[in-house]
Amino acid sequence: MYKPKAPIDHTNAVITIKGLEKSFDDYHVLRGIDLDLYQGENLVVLGRSGTGKSVLIKIISGLLQADTGSINVLGKDINSITDRELQELRIRIGFSFQNSALYDSMTVRKNLEFPLVRNRKGITRKEIDSAVEEVLEAVGLSQTINQMPSELSGGQRKRIGIARTLILNPEIMLYDEPTAGLDPITCIEINELINEVQEKYKTSSIIITHDLTCAKQTGDRIAMLLDGQFQRQGTFDEVFDTNDERVKPFFDYNFIK
């Protein structure tokens, strides 16, 4: 599938990470991570389960604290900002959770309204309705506005989760396993949506996945996490042009199984 190229500003890093380390007791998950995310870029972080991919984006969003290292997000040092500054920063960062994180007791409309009402003081009903309609149209699910999450398919819930994130117009999107648990056709639709979000909303994104089809279809750049560090970075073909026995079986499993 052809991926339209959104403009990437390689002179403007919206996330800069240096020397990041994170352990849980004696288990060293991240062992000195260096990484830049550039304005307008879709960066895919690949790795096997348990390699620290999700830990990385939780640290970026301030949900976890690093042991050592510097994390600069949109000009803010995550390690030294106040709680209020962190909350303000999080509004500029969209986090698409693996399980979509929708409120089961709320309709789709109410799920989408919730972050607006919570974070945009003084917003009018007309502005709320307009924003809800816009993001539902962007993810192709305008007809679900009055449905409950339990009435939606897994792919639809993923889309609504992304819509709820987009409603605050984030500058950065963090996708945690966006295609996990979905059938192949729905996976392709989610991959296309990620590219459409990049192009329409001019977002910079980190996409956490172990799905190589997702990586190939969405990634402007791939960073492969091995043994707690980024061992290989580049285009999809550059990353997998290797006989490294840690990399080749990963590729073979995805495409030959």
Image: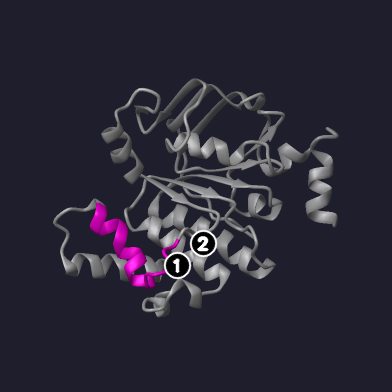
Residue drawn 72% across and 37% down?
Answer: 239
Whole-percent x, y for residue 214 in the image: 64, 54
Whole-percent x, y for residue 103 in the image: 41, 64
Residue 193: which numbered mark, if any?
2
Residue drawn 32% across and 54% down?
Answer: 168
- Magenta highlight on residue 139: no
Whole-percent x, y for residue 174 in the image: 48, 46
- Magenta highlight on residue 114: yes
- Residue range of the region highlighted in magenta in the rendering: 102-118
Residue drawn 83% across and 32% down?
Answer: 244
Q: Nearer the viewer, residue 13 or 92?
A: 92
Going by the image, does 57 lie left or right of 181? left
For the C terminus, the quadrant is bottom right
Going by the image, does 105 lie left or right of 178? left
- Of labels 2 and 1, earlier in sequence is 1
Indicate the secondary structure of the residue bearing disc 2: helix
The residue carrying mark 1 is: 139
Where residue 250 sits, quadrant-wise, is top right
Whole-percent x, y for residue 21 in the image: 57, 23
Q: Magenta span: helix, strand or loop, mainly? A: helix
Residue drawn 65% across and 70% down?
Answer: 185
Going by the image, does 41 lie left or right of 246? left
Say which amino acid is labelled 2.
Leu
Q: Nearer the viewer, residue 173 or 219?
A: 173
Say which amino acid is labelled 1.
Val
Where residue 137 sits, quadrant-wise, is bottom left
For the N terminus, the quadrant is bottom right
Disc 2, disc 1: CB below 8 Å? yes
Residue 162: which numbered mark, if any?
none
